[in-house]
Image: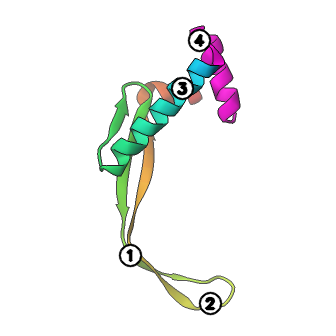
Amino acid sequence: MNKADLIGAIASESKLTKANAKKALEAFLKVTSGSLKKGDKVTLVGFGTFSVAKRAARVARNPRTGKEIKVPARKIAQFKPGAELKGLVR
């Protein structure tokens, strides 16, 4: 499912127009991204939790040349599914 499909599904499920469903989805993405950028968690009970994790610096190996390279520390976005979502997917 891509973004256009998701907008269509939201519109039909919630009886909104596609334009309003698109605005709602974009607002959700903007607010969630902003919260993660600040380092906050976004928890949707039953669905899951979006959070930011720190990945430590490490030494990796280039598979083509075998040469060691340094990978710097960075922050990554994570999603942990909730119990209800896990149950639906099983």
Residue positioned 37% across, 44% down in the render: 34
Q: Looking at the picture, does residue 46 appear above or below residue 33? A: above
Distance of label 4 from label 3 (alpha carbons): 11 Å
Residue positioned 35% across, 36% down in the render: 42
Nearer-N-terminus badge (1/2): 1
Nearer-N-terminus badge (4/1): 4
For residue 16, which numbered disc appears in the image?
4
61 vs 35, left or right, is right
Location of mark 2 (residue) = 66
Q: Looking at the picture, does residue 15 appear above or below residue 63? A: above
**Residue 58 position within the rendered picture, expressed as x and y whole percent measured from the top left:** 42, 78
**Which stretch did the figure color magenta?**
1-18
Q: Name the magenta segment's main secondary structure.
A: helix
For residue 57, which numbered disc appears in the image?
1
Distance of label 1 from label 3 (alpha carbons): 38 Å
Split into 4 quadrants, where in the image is the C terminus?
top right
**Residue 5 position within the rendered picture, expressed as x and y whole percent measured from the top left:** 70, 28
Q: Looking at the picture, does residue 21 appear above or below residue 89? A: above
**Discs 4, 3 touching: Cβ within 8 Å:** no
**What's the residue type where badge 1 is placed?**
Ala
Query: Which callout, 1 or 2, points to the residue nearer the camera?
Result: 1
Nearer-N-terminus badge (2/3): 3
